[in-house]
Amino acid sequence: MDIKEIQNLIKFVAKSGANEVKLEMDDVKITIRTGSENETTIVQQVPMQAAPVMQQQVPAQPAAAPVKETAAPATEDSKYITIKSPIIGTFYRKPSPDKPVFVEVGTDIKEGDVLCVIEAMKLFNEIESEISGKIVKVLVDDASPVEFDQPLFLVDPS
């Protein structure tokens, strides 16, 4: 079973409204569970000879993850402004591996300052601040994939 067939199966199960579907074939066992928030998860187990069963969990709808992160902000963080990713890509804190990071926690920023770079389709897009303030927290690890509207930084505007 290839990845396209698995993706089609996930879409079919999500549209059907079923809570759980199990599929067992010769060397593959797939369980698809849908949660109450339209979240779908695949658990794929491939038994190997003379080795323990491997289990891999893959989110079927990665765009749903950022919604969960911002759904319940802490009261302590409510005074901060969240800078979010304007595009999908790979997040980098440095312009190149041998250069220093654009911003650290505690860095004062002003409107137009470059905060990070997001690589999308071999293009490196500088993400500039639209507000002034102080970086309180960096929410994404360097060289990590990010989704559209995923929180990147917390900024104290005062």
Image: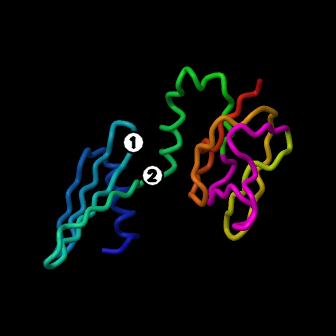
Relative horizontal placement of residue 1, taking residue 100 as reference (left or right): left
**Residue 23 location in percent, x, y?**
20, 62
Q: Is residue 64 above or below residue 53?
A: above
Q: Is residue 133 above or below residue 158?
A: below
> Mark 1 belongs to which amino acid?
Asn
**Residue 136 location in percent, x, y?**
66, 34
Quarter location, residue 82: top right
Relative horizontal placement of residue 63, taking residue 103 as reference (left or right): left
Q: CA distance from mark 1 to mark 2?
A: 9 Å
**Residue 55 location in percent, x, y?**
26, 62
Most foreground residue, 146 or 6: 146
Q: Main secondary structure of the magenta part?
A: loop
Most foreground residue, 102 or 31: 102
Asked whether residue 13 is drawn in magenta, I would say: no
Can you tell which mark lies on residue 61? Answer: 2
Counting other residues with Cα less than 10 Å from the Cα at mark 2, is it few (<14), some (14-19), or many (20 or more)?
few
Relative horizontal placement of residue 41, taking residue 24 as reference (left or right): right
Q: Is residue 36 above or below residue 48?
A: above
> Residue tagged by mark 1?
38
Q: Residue drawn at (80%, 47%), measured in percent from left and top?
A: 128
Relative horizontal placement of residue 27, taking residue 39 as reference (left or right): left
What residue range appears in magenta? 85-110
